[in-house]
Image (cartoon, rainbow, N blue to C red):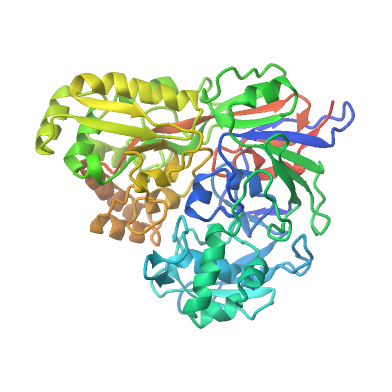
Amino acid sequence: MAVGVVTTALVAGTLASCSSEGEQIPSIGYAIDNTITTYNAGTVDGAASGARQAFGRVLPGFTFTGPEGGAVADTDIGSAAPVPGDSLTIAYTINQASVYSDGVPVTCDDLVLAWAAHSGRFTGADGQLFQAASTAGYSDIQSIDCRPGAKDARVVFEPGRAFSDWRSLFGATALMPAHVVQTATGANIVDSVQNSDEDAMARIAEFWNTGWDLAPGDVDPTKFPASGPYKIESYTEDDGLVLVENDQWWGNRPATSRIVIWPKSDELPSRVDDGDVQVIDVAAGSVDGLNLEGFEEVETASRNLEQFVLSTEGEFGSAAARRAFAACLPREQLASEFGTTKDPEAGAVGVDGTVDTRFTAPDTLIYPQVAAAAGGRFRQPDAGAVKSALAEADATNLTVRVGYLGPDAYRAAIVSAAAAACEPMGITVEDAGSPDFRPSALRDGQVDAVLGGTASVQGAGGTAAPTTAAYALRAGNGSNFGRYDNGRINQIVDQLAIDPSTGTQLSLSTEAENILWNEVPTVPLFEQVRINAFDKGMSVVQANGTRSGAGWNMDRWVLRG
């Protein structure tokens, strides 16, 4: 991986140092705490899944999310730089040597596909054609100058919409193989987008939404070409998701030729005991019976905000009902029990304790002032506040079904603690965790709340930028699972995205929290504590408490035994 630091330095501690002792083992097992149901991390379900943890070095982009949470340039893919223009204009140059594992070149067509899918501009009778998790940044792009098959592109943003976090666009897992879509649909991607061909775009969207779905035993190699150092070889329940060296990769060869990814499963403890797993990346306390003897373990606060994401329909159709639920929760107790690391100085990028904001990270200078908008509310169960809110909602009681991806001992414990605190106040909290759970169940009315991380992700999540968290509360965004819609919040999110000045971030974020603590579309808890554990024979491994997870540099991993 050839990288250049764009917005952050890689300063988090390396967890296993290089060792020359013993013979190198040709395969490494990597366990994550999320499902892998699609190759496409950009869809609603894909962004909430473990796709980013699994495919960051299978489908790289112009940047990746580094250990500190910022966008780091991956120069193996190419370069991106601002150029003069009437509005923000970025020139992208794709590495001339870049090809997919099937031999087809990586081209600007792939950028055009990513933009089209995330732009929000293609609609049909039922709404958005593309089921994208987020339109952040991409919706601000006015045009992409791309000649089909070319190795360069010029991206022009709308006047007045200079997206501050532009470096994160077209990053790892965002660039899907456009030629696969073109073969499947018969539609030329660039021409269809430029001409707004409705029929062609409908076919393109249908494939982008579901054509890359993944299930054990169902891997057609022609549909899943890779542009990184690894490619998919197979995917089975018994043998995991097997990545092998991509012989078409033009960069440095991966240090280990085979990585086996084990998605979330109740079999993780036995796989660890059987020696199938050498790298573990899970939420602290989420796996019962996990024996880490023989592993180096680091527990760290992450960029992933653990929270309840609430529906705005059904039981929670009124803000008063949502406030009643928030008022019965023991937030400080939950943060103390589940959101505190053993060693706060051990390479953490997050902060221990209760978090009182949705967009503003606790390690930023403006956090104390923004968090003050909460006014100390909803930290301890408050029977009087619950009674008042229920009366305002014209209700005597509530039943709240909380969904999350199971099995998960730590989230089950959070739901249990919430149930114990809320039951005496007339609010019944039911555990609706399931091995088949997806956050879209909230939108479908199957649950009343999602217990998850940033943008409802069920595994690793978050970045240093507030973009993902903010857009998860913007109307029309795919990751807004609770369908929250407030016109002023939409305006604030849009303005925060283009104005990084401290004054604007402080004033608008404070205004947003005042609104959000009154309407309570979410209840923030704490920054999720992550466990990164590595076999003591591992080297060149570095924790990453962001959406990238520990696998962000898996092509450099070495195991000796």
> In the displayed structure, does residue 204 sit left or right of residue 87?
right
Q: Is 307 left, or right, of 507 in this rendering?
A: right
On screen, residue 518 above or below 83: above
Q: Residue furthest bottom?
A: 195
The quadrant of the rendering that contains the C terminus is top right
Residue 41 point in image, percent of width and height: 56, 52
Residue 485, horizontal then vertical, whole percent: 27, 54
Q: Residue at x 44, y 35 (%)?
A: 404
State the residue in front, 487 or 312.
Answer: 312
Camera sees residue 19: yes
Residue at figure coordinates x 58%, y 26% from the top left: 266
513 above or below 419?
A: below
Front-most of 145 and 106? 106
Residue 326 coordinates in the image, percent (x, y): 25, 32
Left or right position of 372 against 253? left
Q: How many marks?
A: 0
Q: Nearer the viewer, residue 25 or 192?
A: 192
Q: Residue at x 30, y 27 (%)?
A: 429
Q: Quadrant of residue 320?
A: top left
Residue lying at the far front of the rendered structure: 217
- Dividing the picture into quadrants, the one containing residue 490 is bottom left
The residue lying at 67 percent from left, 71 percent from top is 183
Q: Is residue 472 placed above or below 343 in the rendered structure?
A: below
> Can residue 377 be seen in this snapshot?
no
State the image coordinates of residue 19 (x, y, percent, origin top left): 82, 29
